[in-house]
Amino acid sequence: MSKYIIDGGHSLSGTITVDCAKNAYLPILAGTILCDGEVILKRPPRFTDVMNMCLILEKLGMKVTQENDALIINGSKANPRFVPVDIAKLLRSSIFTLGAMLGRFKQARVAYPGGCDIGLRPIDLHLKGLRDMGVIITESHGIINCDATKLHGGMVHLDFASVGATENLILTAVLGKEKTTILNCAREPEIVDLCNFLNKMGARIFGAGTGRIEIEPVKKLYGTEYTPIGDRIIAGTYLIAGAITHGEIEVCGCNTMFFSSLIDKLRYSGCVLKVKSDKIYLKSPKTLKSVGFVETQVYPGFPTDLQAQILTLQTVSEGSCVVQENIFESRFKFVPELIKMGAKVRARDCTAYIEGVDSLSGAEVYAKDLRGGASLVLAGLTAKGYTTVHDIYHIERGYSDLDLCLNSLGAKIRRED
Ligand code: EPZ
């Protein structure tokens, strides 16, 4: 299993441009199933999740090629084949193919999805919403069989503003027969990006980014060219890398509005920030201050995908802090690994209590999921001595060449297979 070996204590400096967002690229890839023409997606990030999603599209008969810095996807020969379990379980986003296949073929068979082990990750909200749209669903032996021949429009209310459920219902409704309104839907920038992409293909979706999305059905979608938004979670991860190493960095390529909640916390921690629309400069102080309290919320609240990173920053910030994880029920799996490095953290249920220490010390630690794993790298950057982060396949699901990128900013990380 590959690992990172980090020689800690080096301040980061320089400029980095983030990749396109994993959580925009994945539903957009599923959205290409809706089109029987050619779609060109620019700047594909080299994340394993994106590569696995392309594998799923090929299993469905889609043609996927890569030319220069773009994916060329042709759905003319797509068919509602079963998405094999061994691939579906590799990533959460395999579930998005369900909505897209129902949208185009009015039938689908998918296995229960996989993804990060950060909680039960049920899909009850997806299935309830689809049933409310007239989809007949039977589940047996871990396989979900759907029949959307009687798909109808109307009002669909989500009990929780689930990102994936919102995306799945949109993908199902775009080529429907009647208007569909989704209430209490997710407002994340990645939802808006998916809708912008679908509308560029000829869909008629209104209200993306609000709690009420209306989809006027259309008969067909047409091929297009599209570049998804920058990855706000990677941008936030690099900003925190700059902060935790008392460095001075500039992060480009992502709309800074998308992570304004983090910017607010970094200012509170004593960092100096100069914010432009698509780039941000950070200078970290010699002594970081605790931000006191962080509570993860749906967008535009503090994102759950940056919880591990900000918690790690608090372990070396002066004072005490409480981190409340409200989105996933098991997102503190990285905390025991931080404690091995000398962090003073007590996590109970979905609340973590942190007492800042002067410094962490390098240790052998193990990534358990994507964002928790990336946070162990952040801890290694500031720790005294050497840190080895094992099982970095978790991290490579959502960060490409994290070692090379951080080394370009002055870190000292070696990747070993
Ligand atoms: C998306 O996951 C993201 N993944 C996650 O990013 C992100 O953390 C999450 O949204 C929240 O922003 C992708 O976009 C591929 P949810 P998703 O449905 O769609 C519960 C990362 O690190 N829930 O909004 O799975 C669920 O268990 C990943 O990049 C149900 O109970 O998130 C969770 O507690 C991690 N029933 C909460 O809602 C359902 O049917 C939020 O889930 C669906 C969800």
Image: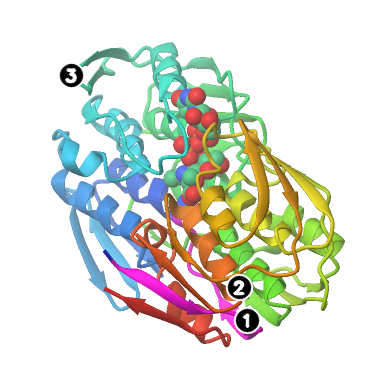
* Residue that mark 3 sits on: 141
Q: Amino acid at mark 3?
A: His
Is 65 positioned to the left or the right of 342 in the image? left
Judged by depth in the image, the label closer to the viewer, 1 or 3, is 1
Q: Nearer the viewer, residue 297 or 277?
A: 297
Mark 1 vs mark 3: which is more N-terminal? 1
Is the distance from the Cβ of mark 1 to the nearest ligand 1 atom less than 8 Å?
A: no
Work out how far the residue at label 2 is from the one at label 3, CA to CA, in angstroms: 47 Å
Magenta stretch: residue 10 in it?
A: yes
Where disc 2 sits, the SS reads loop
Q: Classify 10 Å Cα crowding around label 2: few (below 14), some (14-19), many (20 and above).
A: many
Q: CA distance from mark 1 to mark 3?
A: 51 Å
Is 56 placed above or below 378 here?
above
* Location of residue 23 in the rendering, given as x and y in whole percent from the top left corner: 47, 51
Query: Residue 81's spot in the image, x, y percent?
Result: 13, 35
Q: Check disc 2 and report the residue beneath it.
A: 383
**C-beta proximity under 8 Å, tags 2 and 3:** no
Q: Are marks 2 and 1 in contact (CB under 8 Å)?
A: yes
Q: Which residue is mark 1?
A: 9
Is residue 415 or residue 217 the one in the foreground? Answer: 415
Q: Nearer the viewer, mark 2 or mark 3?
A: 2
Magenta stretch: give its range: 2-22
Answer with left or right where residue 291 lies relative to residue 413: right
Question: Which numbered disc, 2 or 1, marks the residue that appears first in the sequence?
Answer: 1
Q: Mark 1 is on which residue type?
A: Gly
Quadrant of the rendering where the N terminus is positioned: bottom left
- Counting residues from the N terminus, which is met first, the one under dot 2 or under dot 3? 3
Instruction: Tell me the amino acid under the disc marked 2.
Output: Ala
Number of on-image labels = 3
Residue at 55% x, 83% y is 411
Give the Cα separation between the discs numbered 2 and 1. Answer: 6 Å
